[in-house]
Image (spheres, rainbow, N blue to C red):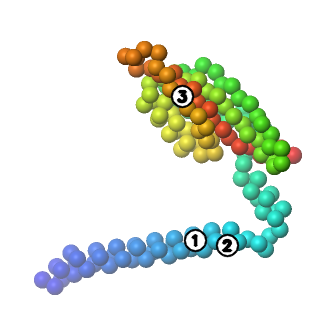
Amino acid sequence: MCLALYFSTVQPAQQRLDTARLSAISLHDRITRAGQALNDNARPIDEQLATFYQIFPSERDSTEWVGKIAAIAKRNGLILQQVDYKEERDKTGKLIRFQMSLPLTGEYPTIRKFLSDLQAQIPIVSLEQVQFERQKVGSPLVDAKLRLVIFLGQSS
């Protein structure tokens, strides 16, 4: 009876405890590394800033991003009439705000799936504005106007 109690209760509880300990250790390590990154005063500010700007994709790839977004829309079965885009250069920093306006036509759940796929496949894109309009009350199709933004690094 003791063996049954051990294997049914004590051993699973021990395994859960070990898993929780490993998780706590991993979390502690991640917090320590994040703290070190925040308190990275050993490196000069210029070097830290240069590292920050390296995170952003290059402005040379801006048209590539439009193509990737259009491909995701097509995979989701959405009708993309056109893409209007404009670039705004940061006056003080080294970033470019690449703004895209996408008028789409499709079913509402499909547009929501497109936005979800977009975030999963291109995590650097952000949704700035969305507007939905249905032409007829019973129509399954909606017209959506999306405004997306990607921040790009300026080419030297």
Amino acid marked by disc 2: Gln
Residue 82 x %, y %: 64, 21
Residue beneath label 2, please? 36
Q: Secondary structure at mark 3?
A: strand
- Say if 3 sits above or below 149 in the image: below
Report the number of discs. Answer: 3
Residue 50 x %, y %: 80, 57
Q: Secondary structure at mark 2?
A: helix
Which mark, by number, is residue 8? none
Which mark, by number, is residue 31? 1
Q: Are marks 3 and 1 in contact (CB under 8 Å)?
A: no
Amino acid marked by disc 1: Ile
Residue beneath label 3, please? 131
Q: Residue furthest bottom?
A: 2
| Badge nearest the viewer, 3 or 1 | 3
Q: Secondary structure at mark 1?
A: helix
Q: Quadrant of the N terminus?
A: bottom left
Q: Residues within 10 Å of mark 2 (few under 14, many from 20)?
A: few
Q: Say which residue appears at 40% left-offset and 20% top-offset.
A: 140
Residue 69 visible in rendering: no
Residue 107 visible in rendering: yes
- Say if 59 sits above or below 134 in the image: below
Q: Say which residue appears at 43% left-offset and 14% top-offset.
A: 136
| Badge nearest the viewer, 3 or 2 | 3
Q: Is residue 65 left or right of residue 144?
A: right
Q: Residues within 10 Å of mark 3 (few under 14, many from 20)?
A: few
- Say if 41 sits above or below 61 in the image: below
First along the sequence among labels 3 and 2: 2
Residue 149 x %, y %: 66, 38
- Return the residue nearer the eye: 53 or 70: 53
